[in-house]
Every structure is written in structure tokens, then in C-alpha cells.
Amino acid sequence: MTLTGLRAFLSAGLCAAVLTACSDETPAGDPAPALGARSAHAFVVMGPDGATRDHLLSGVAGPDADLHPAAAAEARAALDALIAGQTLSVTPAGEPDRYDRTPAQAALPDGRDLAAALVETGWAMVWPREGQAADFEALFAAEARARRDNAGAWAEGVFEVFDPDPNTLAQRLDGPVIVTGRIVSTGEGRDGRLYLNFGLDWRTDFTVSATRQTRSRFEDSGLALESLDGAVVRARGWLYAEDGPMIALNHTAQIEVLDAP
């Protein structure tokens, strides 16, 4: 494939991925009076039967309560301030988690997407979870504004965008990270697992991996991960150690292509 053709392919793939993962607005949902925030990104409402229902805001996450308890408390207060006394329009966006919280997209009475409004305060970041739907186009735009304004947890260093230096990332193991860098090479394991390498030594450098199933999801969205050799991307996910710092992909919104090869 020529360079021009590759750029066209990546551009088309990225647009298709955005169209697949995002919608223009939060879907119309059921009206539900908000009863308060449970955590930095979870809230409770009253259902039409009068029973309480717990929801997890789809596509976002607040500061980790174990790693940053003070910031997590501020994030919960920010969510509480947004929903206090409001009747939300709530649309389920995934299966309940182990705490019986149903992932949901929610809209405020003025039509704003609740998750995007929270992200813009700087007290939540975009956090795609497997099997959950969200308006990621709006969420990424809100996060960009929060980073630009150094708002909320961005000002406190709780949220941060890292470069792919493995020594720096080693200090963030077992936690959520956002990393921006150029993919130096790609490689495939015998089991079909794909590795996006951000350094010359895959044994120690930062890597993003994707199983065969996840690769198929990206291909369905219009983006072939193996074509990203040389691309500048922003990747996000839980950082763990496997031949250096690594993120495993399970959602197409975990990768943003910032610059094609």
C-alpha cells in the first residue's frame, strides 16, 4: 500500500470508528429523579416504581479512591453538584456490574450529556469499558477542554497524559494511565495477539496489546490495528507489567489516532 493510500485508509478507519463508537447525542431515556452520587462516577436515581436504582456513568471514571481518596471525594462532590435536584434522562448502556450498578448514559434537563459535563469539570476522565456504549466523540472533546484549562484532577496531577518512557510508567503500574506516543513497530504472537510497540526493545518498553477478538472489533469499526506502525496514538487503560509496562485493549475507544504514519 502506498503512503497516500495508507493515510486514506487510516483516515477512513478513524472516521468509521468514531461513527461506530459514538452518537451525536445521548439517546432519549426514561426520566429519573436523581437521589445523589454514590462515588466519583456512580449515582442513584428513583425508578418509576419508586425503587432506587444504581447506575455507573458509561465511558468515564473518576479518580481511583484507593490511590487518590481526596480527589475521589472532590469528584463525587462534583457529580453531586451536577445532579442535585435534577430529573435525569437515563438510558442503560451495558450489563450490570458486580455491584449491581447498571452502566448508563444520562442527560441533564438542559440536554447536556452528564458524563461529558462531569469530564469537563476535570473530575472524570474518558474511560472506555468493555461492552459499554457512550458518546466518545463528545467525551474526548470535553476531556481536551479540561486538559487545556488544567481543571480539577488535571491540575492536581491525579490525571495526566504520559509519554511512553517505561521508567516513568513503571511508577504507575497497577493503575489507570493515558499514554501518547508513536508506535515504533507491530508484532503478532502465535495466538493472534497483536503487540503495538512504543520502543525498540519489546522486552522492556511500553506496549499495547490486543487479542484476536479485540482486533476484530477494531476491524469492524474500520481500523486495522496492524496498520498503525508509525502512527502517533493516545492509548488509555489499566497499566500492568508484562515484558515492560503494558495496556491490554478491550474497547475500540481506548485508542485515538492522532497522526497517521
Image: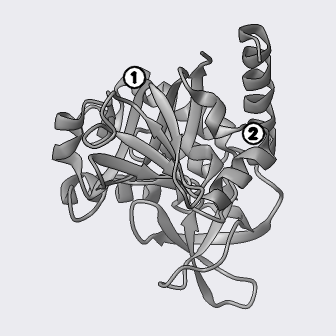
Type of amino acid under label 1 = Asp
Residue 7: x and y in percent read 72, 15
Amino acid marked by disc 2: Ala
Q: Can you give x and y, in whole percent of width and height, for residue 162 in the image?
A: 31, 31
Q: Which residue is mark 1?
A: 149
Q: Is residue 233 above or below residue 47?
A: above
As drawn, 60 above or below 161: below
Quadrant where the N terminus is found in the figure: top right
State the image coordinates of residue 260 (x, y, percent, origin top left). Answer: 62, 18
Q: Which mark is residue 221?
A: none
Q: For residue 197, what is the image quadrant?
A: top left
Residue at label 2? 17
Q: In which quadrant of the rendered view does residue 193 lie?
A: bottom right
Q: CA distance from mark 2 to mark 1?
A: 27 Å
Work out whether residue 22 can be spotted.
no
The image shows residue 93 at horizontal and vertical percentages of 70, 66
- What is the residue that sits farthest to the front in this orientation? 190
Compared with residue 13, is residue 72 higher up or lower down, i.e. above or below? below
Please identify, in this view, whether the residue under mark 2 or under mark 1 is nearer the observer.
Answer: 2
Please tell me how crowded label 2 is: few (under 14), some (14-19), or many (20+) other residues with Cα within 10 Å: many
